[in-house]
Image: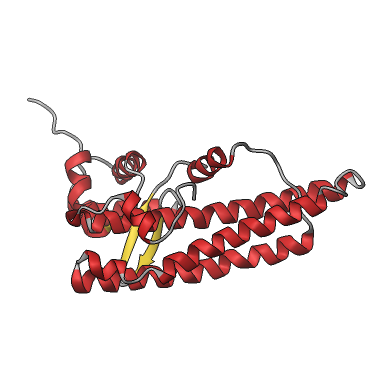
Amino acid sequence: MASKKKGLSMEEKANRVEEWFARHPQPYLLKEITTLVPKATGVIPQSIEEALELLLSEDRITCDKLGISNLYWKFAPGQAAGQQGSAGGGNKKKQVSFESIAAAIKTPEELRGSIAELKNRLLEVTSATESREAILEQPDEIIATDDRTKQLRSEIAVTVDECSKFADRDPLVAQQMQQSTEIALEAANRWAENVALLEQFVLRRLSHLGITARQFREQFEIPEDL
């Protein structure tokens, strides 16, 4: 008599769900996950939420609030930073002053609020009309976020140039400034990635309207190398 097939443990289910996220690096609503993941992994819908809770508790995936819903995703380490580095033409380390770094660190906090507000506005618009015109009438928030990111990068570039004159005078101070600069650059890259995530979300939700990524960026004046 054949032995009864043993079911998957919760850790095995969580691993399968995590692998699925890794193969599909973009944000998903819970409703989409419970529809797509079971077909691809064999994990039953009733176990999906429990697997997500386990992955979140171990910081293996990321979750962010979008209106009354949650977005879940997983990206490869350094994915966004790598893309930004290739667009910038190299990974040369930079040095800046502590005063400028302190000012730059505040800017991502302001960007976080702008992006959160933008998500809510876009959700309201898409839920109310599901039309291209409704989205295209709201460009100000996206442009403002793009301008903040450009401003942050410009400030870093200016302070790099200023501090390069004194970099050889104190090796310890130069090392500390370099570490601070890397933190600021990582912050700028994170919010550039958030703009890209928002673009993916809008394009996916309005795919039936035939809007392309290029049309989206042209409409909201987002540069190709952002």
Q: Quadrant of the N terminus?
A: top left
Q: Residue at x 52, y 54 (%)?
A: 190
Q: Residue at x 49, y 47 (%)?
A: 225
When asked about the image quadrant of residue 85, the answer is top right
Q: Is residue 101 above or below residue 225?
A: below
Residue at the far top in the pictured view = 1
Q: Is residue 164 above or below residue 209?
A: above
Left or right: 124 as drawn, with respect to 163: left
Q: Nearer the viewer, residue 192 or 52?
A: 192
Residue 53 can be seen, yes or no: no
Q: Position of residue 193 (x, y in %)?
A: 47, 52
Q: Residue at x 31, y 71 (%)?
A: 137
Residue 187 can be seen, yes or no: yes
When asked about the image quadrant of residue 13, the answer is top left
- The colour mode here is secondary structure
Q: Position of residue 94 (x, y in %)?
A: 72, 46
